[in-house]
Image (spheres, grey):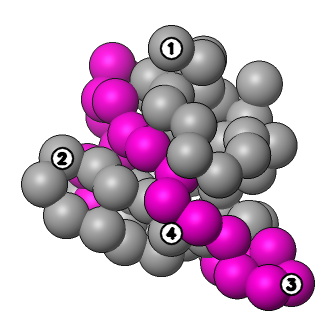
C-alpha cells in the first residue's frame, strides 16, 4: 500500500521508499526511514498536500511524494 492511499487519522509504518536521487535524500532527511511510525493528521480540501505527524513534528507532503512511500497499516 502507498502512503497517498491512506485516509485521515490513520497510523502507518514505513516499509520502503521508491524515490531516487535528491528526492530520496529529502525524504530520508525528513525522517522517512524503514520502520518509522507516522500518523496522517489531515488532507487539504482538494487532497493535496497531506499533513503528517512523524517523530515529534508535523509536516506536509505532496501526494506525488507520498506515492513513492510504501507503508503498512498498524
Q: Quadrant of the N terminus?
A: top right
Which one is earlier in the sequence, the residue at label 1 or at label 2? 2
Asked if residue 69 shows in the view, the reply is no
Residue extending farthest front = 9
Q: CA distance from mark 4 to mark 1?
A: 18 Å
Residue extending farthest right = 46
> Residue beneath label 2, please?
55
Asked whether residue 37 is drawn in magenta, I would say yes
Name the chief secondary structure element in magenta: loop
Q: CA distance from mark 3 to mark 4?
A: 13 Å
Q: CA distance from mark 4 to mark 2?
A: 13 Å
> Residue beneath label 4, please?
51
* Span shown in magenta: 30-49
Residue 18: % across, % down:
63, 38
> Residue beneath label 1, please?
74
> Which type of secondary structure does the marked residue at label 1 adopt?
loop
Q: CA distance from mark 3 to mark 1?
A: 26 Å
Compared with residue 61, is residue 44 higher up or lower down, i.e. above or below?
A: below
Q: CA distance from mark 3 to mark 2?
A: 26 Å
Residue 70: % across, % down:
64, 29
> Which type of secondary structure does the marked residue at label 4 adopt?
strand
> Residue beneath label 3, please?
46
At horizontal 30% and vertical 68% (from top left) the residue drawn is 58
Which one is earlier in the sequence, the residue at label 3 or at label 2? 3
Tag 4 and tag 1, C-beta contact below 8 Å: no
Q: Residues within 10 Å of mark 3 (few under 14, many from 20)?
A: few
At horizontal 74% and vertical 66% (from top left) the residue drawn is 63
Amino acid at each position: 500500500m502507498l502512503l497517498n492511499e491512506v485516509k485521515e487519522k490513520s497510523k502507518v509504518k514505513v516499509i520502503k521508499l521508491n524515490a531516487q536521487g535528491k528526492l530520496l535524500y529529502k525524504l530520508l532527511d525528513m525522517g522517512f526511514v524503514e520502520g518509522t511510525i507516522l500518523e496522517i493528521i489531515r488532507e487539504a480540501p482538494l487532497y493535496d498536500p497531506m499533513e503528517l505527524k512523524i517523530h515529534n513534528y508535523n509536516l506536509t507532503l505532496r501526494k506525488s511524494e507520498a506515492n513513492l512511500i510504501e507503508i503498512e497499516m498498524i
